[in-house]
Structure formats: C-alpha cells, structure tokens
DNA sequence: ATGTTTAAAGACATAATACTCTTAATTACA
DNA sequence: TGTAATTAAGAGTATTATGTCTTTAAACAT
C-alpha cells in the first residue's frame, strides 16, 4: 500500500469537504456515514488534519469540521504529509539506509524517477480538483449502486 | 512504503544470489550475514521464494538456496508478487473498492499512469540487471564504509 | 546407525497499524 | 443554570507485520 488507511480516509474526507458549495461545518458523524468509515477512527484521523491546520473544527451544536484554506490551495501532498508524515517517497525501494546519489542501490535511478513523478502528482493536484473530478465514488451509495448492477 | 520489508529483504537476497558467478547453493546464514538481515526472518522470506519456484533449496551439508532460473529471466516483479502478492499496484490510491474505469475515483486516471509506470519498471528489470548495476550497496560492509567517511 | 549440517514448519513475541470506546472540554440554546 | 451537541484526548482492544526461537525433516559423512 502506498498510503496508509488513515491517509486514504483523510484524503477522502478532505475531498468530500472540498466538494461542498458552502464551507460550513460538517459533523464528523455525517462524514463518516457518507464515506462509510468508522466514526471513531475518522475522528482520530481528522484531528491530525486539524492540528496540521488543514481543517478547523468547532465544538457544540452546529459544530463540526471544515476546510481552513481554500480547497484550491490544499494539495494532495499536504494531506498525505499531515497524516503519514514525510512518507514513503524519501525511502530507498530496497530499504537500504545509505542509499543516495553517492552510493545508489541498484534500483536507485529508476526508482528516483518514479518517486519524482508520484511526488509531482501529489504536489500538483489539489483537493479542489479532485472534488471537481467527480466525487461520485467517494460515497458508498453510488459505489454500491455501481457494484450491484 | 511501497514494498513491505519482507519484500525488500527478498529482493536483496535475490540480487545477491544473482550476483554470484556460479549458481551454487548459498546458506541462508551466509546471506543473512552479508545483507545484515535477521537469519530467522530471512529464512521465512526465502521460503516463499522457494515455494514460488524462484529459488530452490537443498538441505544438509553444502546445502542452501540458489536461483532456480537464470537471473536474466527473473524480474523484479516476480519477486515482489511472490512475497507481497498481487500487491499495491492493483489498488485504488484512495482505497475505494469499486474504483475502476467504469467508476473511477477522482485520482484514478493519474494514479493509473503511475501504477503503469511502476509496473513496467518492475516487469522490465531483471535481478541480473540489478546485480550488474553494482551490488556494492547490498552488503553492509560497503554501506558502513560509505556512511562513516 | 549415529551425528552434523542444513532448510522447513510451526509456535511464540513484539511492534505497528487499525479500530473502539469512554471521558473531558467547548459551545449553543432553552 | 442545566442539558444536548459536538470535537479532543486518552485508554483500551484487534489485527497485521515483523522478528525470534524450537522442533522436525532431509541430506550427508563417518
């Protein structure tokens, strides 16, 4: 798995929020139901996004979470690094600690290119774009409809 | 992490074996010491490669493991799938079960291209090539030498 | 036959990730 | 002032990945 489950959940929630017309607070309960993710677990994941100042939260009635910045300014990578940390894409594909330009592992060159591509993808795509690209498949209603027919 | 540790260990061992001039049996003990991997754990990993008919093993004195096929005929992907299964590269980046051409997730197109690239890389590079590319960095002796200077 | 060398198989231990629940803190509203 | 709605924080459990060890089986040497 390239991304942890936590990370995928966080991305899906972010995209879901980015797809809202008005940036009002949405309860985590509602998000968890729409995305079919455990409420408790999603709560934990979104806490990290709140700490990373990607979301802001509000307690009490009519509270919830919402995007802190404009969705066009939040990249895929922002969300990934907030949850998974500096992530996969610094590591050697073979797990060799000293791997680098000076002492490349046999796969270093090719894997560097791949990493670069993936990193660029993550850095260049915003959650706004992802939301526009149709978030039909983010909620399970649509998904199940697709599967059963 | 794109690949599990088991998988990285299996790759390193395979490349190490591919780098041998004569394809004689090498003890797992020796491999584990050369690659600085726990002997017990490496044993488990290599069992999977033996079951997958990438390696063959022989018990008793002068036994060990060796490549079953010519290293030029064993791809990176062969080793990866033997250990990690059909792996990362069929999965949706957002973990959505129904994601596909019919019902793509927002990231589907871009991620498909990435997966395709990675898959091609894995499929087109053999462990023989990896071994030729210099396996200096596979054994920790060389590695430590690099780190400390 | 017996003992030594090796991998295979299986049992166990530890760590990381995923997931669940409870309690505390904050806000709104009656 | 008190109660309901909501996230935050923390504790606990479950599952999976990783790592260790012991026992068994195969091959060889004597």
Image (spheres, coloured by chain):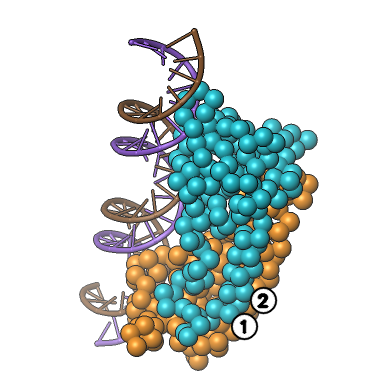
Chain colours: A cyan, B orange, C brown, D purple
Badges 1 and 2, same chain: yes
Taking A39 as reference, is B52 above or below it? below
Label 1 belongs to which residue?
B72
A141 lies left or right of D27: right
Label 2 belongs to which residue?
B124
Q: Which element carries disc 1, helix, strand or loop?
A: helix
**Of A98 and A69, which appears nearest the observer?**
A69
Q: Residue at x 55, y 87 (%)?
A: B133
Chain that bears disc 1: B
Quarter where residue B46 is shown: bottom left
Q: Earlier in the sequence, mark 1 or mark 2?
A: 1
Chain that bears disc 2: B
Q: Position of residue D15 (x, y in %)?
A: 44, 43
Q: Is residue B82 visible?
A: no
Separation (CA) of disc 1 from disc 2 = 10 Å
Q: Residue at x 34, y 71 (%)?
A: B39
Query: For the residue carrying disc 2, how many other residues have a C-alpha within 10 Å: few (<14), some (14-19), or many (20+)?
Result: some
**Of A67 and A137, which appears nearest the observer?**
A67
Q: Which element carries disc 2, helix, strand or loop?
A: helix
């Amino acid at each position: 798995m390239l991304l942890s489950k936590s990370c995928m959940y966080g991305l899906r929630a972010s995209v879901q929020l980015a797809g809202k017309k008005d940036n009002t607070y949405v309860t985590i309960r509602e998000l968890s139901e729409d995305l079919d993710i455990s409420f408790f677990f999603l709560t934990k994941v979104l806490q990290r996004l709140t700490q990373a100042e990607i979301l802001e939260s509000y307690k009490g009635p009519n509270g919830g979470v919402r995007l802190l910045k404009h969705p066009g300014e939040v990249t895929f990578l922002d969300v990934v690094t907030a949850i998974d940390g500096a992530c996969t894409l610094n590591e050697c594909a073979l797990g060799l600690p000293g791997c680098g330009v000076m002492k490349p592992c046999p796969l270093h060159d090719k894997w560097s290119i791949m990493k670069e591509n993936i990193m660029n993808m993550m850095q260049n795509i915003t959650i706004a774009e992802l939301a526009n690209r149709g978030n039909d498949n983010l909620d399970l209603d649509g998904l199940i409809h697709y599967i059963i027919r």
